[in-house]
Image (spheres, helix red, strand yellow):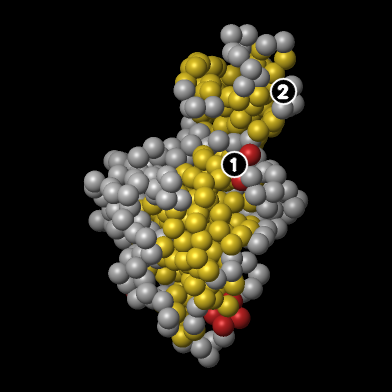
Amino acid sequence: MKNLNNCISFFFLLCINIHVAGQFSKPIIITGLSNTVNETSGLIFHKSELWTHNDSGNKAVLYSIDTVSGDIIRSVEIKNANNRDWEDLCKDQKYAYIGDFGNNSGKRDDLKIYKISLSDLSDINKTSIKAEIINFTYDKNIYPPKFTKKHNTNFDCEAFIAYKDSLYLFSKNWINQKTYLYALPKTPGTYTANLRDSLDSQGLICGADYNPNTNTIALIGYIKGIPAPSIILILYDYIDDNFFSGKTIRYETELSGYQTEAIAFKDNYNLWFTNEKLLANNQTLFSINIQSKNENTNQLKLRPYSFDTNISNQELHIHFDCPSKKCKTKIKLFDKNDNKLIKKNLLFNKSNKTRIIDISDLSNGDYSIQITYKNHKITHRFVN
């Protein structure tokens, strides 16, 4: 991707308490990166090596980055691959996967994922390796036969993860600013990617990573337009591969005008992410902390505030643990078609942490509620 141009959270039954907590540290600059990877577009961390690649039109090569100096330690060519538009990297225990599925124009019908052995990649004596190939297209029943202009589709993709026996793709929707979830097998072959679910990311999703230790997914991207702030979404507490059915926190970072396209878990608490070179913003490696240091590594408990809702007697009780004297928040309620039904500004403080909204006029069905506080948006689904 060369042009720079809420979160649906989780689904619970009536009268079940819902608890979401979270705030991230500010992004920290680790180091500038070599000009060799000025279009860094994917990241994986494996056996103390951080790997990246460039995107469209560059060499079919993976680069190991020195996380102190930003220099290239070594490079490995994928000898039977072309870099039509490499957009992300992911891995499981045995393999790494390269997503050649960038589709800004919407015209591609040669979408590919290259599958390579992690043991081959880790072998310092190898400078080139061969990949297996997974080919796919989108469902022809929903994929338009023709697009009129670039950046005018919901069928771009720049992010994916490996989870159990499948690969899961998160689309980059230029039109509606959502992300769609697709699934593909890990085995080589030719497949159709069918739509599984959607998430109102309110931005362009460009990278993803999965942490099996905490069963957590990180997404990264930016908001379309100027000043284009970078966004990070954390998905957790979901059931099986229903990734949008759990808790989601959307964080709008302090970075504006950075084309952030790649993210990887360094450990259970910290993420690395990179941006492509764009105008005055050179390619850079950042880190961000999303979890208290003393938390159990098997649980993700984000900090430092919490947001709970409870439905009782046709009332929506909203509890917000305000971390300061006064917390000004915006509350929005949507139906399942994302139509906004309620919009309120609510003030919380340390002595009054609960507000009540009358929902007696709502019919039975699926809804979502979103609270915005500072640069965080937290959203979840509920059933009335």
Outermost residue on the front side: it is 141
**Is residue 135 in view from this perspective?**
yes
State the image coordinates of residue 88 (x, y, percent, origin top left).
46, 62
Q: Amino acid at mark 1?
A: Phe
* Residue that carries the numbered disc 2 in the rendered image: 14
User: Any mark on residue 61, and which?
Assistant: none
Check the picture and name the quadrant holding the N terminus. Answer: bottom left
User: Could you tell me which residue is drawn at 73 percent across and 48 percent down?
Assistant: 299
Q: Position of residue 195 (x, y in %)?
A: 52, 46
Q: CA distance from mark 2 to mark 1?
A: 18 Å
Query: Tag 1: Cα neighbours inside 10 Å, few (<14), some, or many (≥20)?
Result: many
Q: Nearer the viewer, residue 145 or 352?
A: 145
Q: Secondary structure at mark 2?
A: loop
Counting other residues with Cα less than 10 Å from the Cα at mark 2, is it few (<14), some (14-19), or many (20 or more)?
A: few
Amino acid type, label 2? Leu
Q: Quadrant of residue 224?
A: top left
Instruction: Work out whether 360 lies above or below 201.
Output: above
Residue 209 visible, this angle:
no
**Residue 257: image location, x then y, percent:** 32, 48
Q: Measuring 64% from the left and 45% from the top, which residue is drawn there? A: 242
Q: Earlier in the sequence, mark 2 or mark 1?
A: 2
Picture coordinates of residue 275 (x, y %)?
A: 39, 58
Q: Determine the residue positioned at 59% across, 76% down.
A: 118
Is residue 238 shown left or right of residue 125? right
Which corner quadrant holds the C terminus?
top right
Quarter occupied by residue 35: bottom left
User: Which residue does the numbered mark 1 point to in the structure image?
Assistant: 244
Instruction: Verify CB contact (< 8 Å) between mark 2 and mark 1.
Output: no
Please give the name of the residue rendered at 29% of the width and 53% of the height, measured from the top-left corner.
Answer: 105
Residue 210 picture quarter: bottom right
Relative side of 41 to 50, left or right: left
Q: Secondary structure at mark 1?
A: helix
